[in-house]
Image: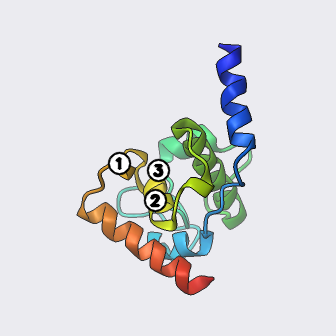
């Protein structure tokens, strides 16, 4: 088990840092204020579900504080990349959006997921 863990950490260390256009992601999520709860109960700018927030937030981090919301979102995304054993530099913006929206969607996204990822990709291109 130790060997597997080291191998995963080593391969992740060889990757570029997870580069997500957080501005574009915020625009796609459509939440205008950090202290807003989405219609399905998701929290803040990046619309993190309450169970995911509970898993990745540290004591004292508040979902309605913009900086805390971003830090937790970064942890979530990094954990997804590690779990999927992929490097950011192996993906384009469309695929990065799918990892955020639904990690399992990256293999066979439905129309809603494709639309989400396309919008994120377009925003990333216009924001660079």
Q: Residue at x 58, y 50 (%)?
A: 77
Q: Residue furthest bottom?
A: 126
Q: Estimate the x, y position of residue 43 in percent, counting from the top left.
A: 51, 58
Lateral position of residue 96 relative to residue 72, left or right: left
Alpha-carbon distance for marks 2 and 3? 20 Å
Lateral position of residue 113 relative to residue 66, left or right: left
Q: Residue at x 73, y 34 (%)?
A: 10
Lateral position of residue 89 relative to residue 32, left or right: right
The crowd level at tag 1 (other Cα within 10 Å; few <14, some 14-19, many 20+) is few
Q: Quadrant of the C terminus?
A: bottom right
Q: Is residue 30 visible?
A: no
Alpha-carbon distance for marks 1 and 2? 9 Å
Q: Which mark is residue 49?
A: 3
The crowd level at tag 2 (other Cα within 10 Å; few <14, some 14-19, many 20+) is many
Label 2: state its secondary structure.
helix
Q: Estimate the x, y position of residue 57 in percent, counting from the top left.
A: 65, 44
Q: Which residue is mark 2?
A: 95
């Amino acid at each position: 088990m130790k060997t597997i863990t080291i191998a995963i950490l080593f391969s992740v260390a060889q990757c570029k840092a997870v580069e997500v256009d957080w501005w574009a992601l915020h625009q796609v999520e459509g939440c205008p204020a950090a202290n807003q709860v989405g219609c399905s109960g998701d929290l803040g700018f990046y619309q993190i579900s309450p169970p995911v927030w509970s898993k990745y937030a540290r004591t004292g981090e508040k979902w309605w504080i913009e900086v805390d919301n971003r830090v937790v979102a970064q942890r979530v995304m990094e954990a997804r990349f590690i779990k999927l054993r992929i490097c950011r530099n192996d993906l384009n913006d469309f695929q990065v959006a799918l990892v955020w929206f639904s990690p399992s969607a990256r293999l066979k996204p439905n129309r809603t997921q494709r639309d989400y990822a396309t919008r994120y990709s377009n925003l990333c291109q216009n924001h660079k």
